[in-house]
Amino acid sequence: ALGSDRVGGKAVNLCNENEPQDVYIGVMEEVIRRVAEEASKELDLDESTSENWTKADRTAWKNNKAAKLVNGLIDRGVVKRTVMTSVYGVTYIGARTQIQEKIEEKVRTDPFPMFTNKSVTGKS
């Protein structure tokens, strides 16, 4: 409303729409897309020569490994708290901690969520 942002206004139900919107689902879908894209990359880096990697190589390797670890674990609950607190100035470290806590909680509850997630299997 304040910024006359139609997309943002729609996401938080400030615009007349036939169906209620859920900003957390929208963010979740984008995160899932980005994580899957990063996880699908095959890096041409030899770990035995990592001492010779550039800073960009190390960053690419780290991002790729992280994406492969969390691919399939992202759901609405993982992004909700961070989206909610972003408007109050949550720091990068705080947001990372929130996400890490939710993913660790999911893995503790179900160590193989990618095999039992109803969105993947189609079953409840």
Image (cartoon, grey):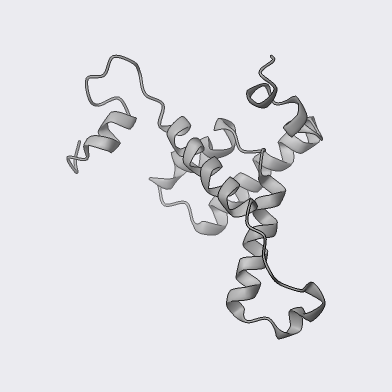
| Residue at x 62%, y 82% (from the top left corner) | 54
In this image, 94 relative to 51: left or right? left
How many marks are shown on the rendered structure?
Answer: 0
**Which quadrant would residue 47 be assigned to in this image?**
bottom right
| Residue at x 47%, y 41% (from the top left corner) | 30
Quarter that holds the N terminus: top left
Asked if 72 appears above or below 56 in the picture, the reply is above
| Residue at x 75%, y 25% (from the top left corner) | 116
Whole-percent x, y for residue 103 in the image: 68, 41
| Residue at x 82%, y 35% (from the top left corner) | 111
Whole-percent x, y for residue 93 in the image: 56, 58
Q: State the residue in front, 75 or 81.
A: 75
Whole-percent x, y for residue 83 in the image: 46, 41
Asked if 47 appears above or below 1 in the picture, the reply is below
Whole-percent x, y for residue 78 in the image: 59, 37
In this image, 89 relative to 32: left or right? left
**Which quadrant would residue 55 be assigned to in this image?**
bottom right
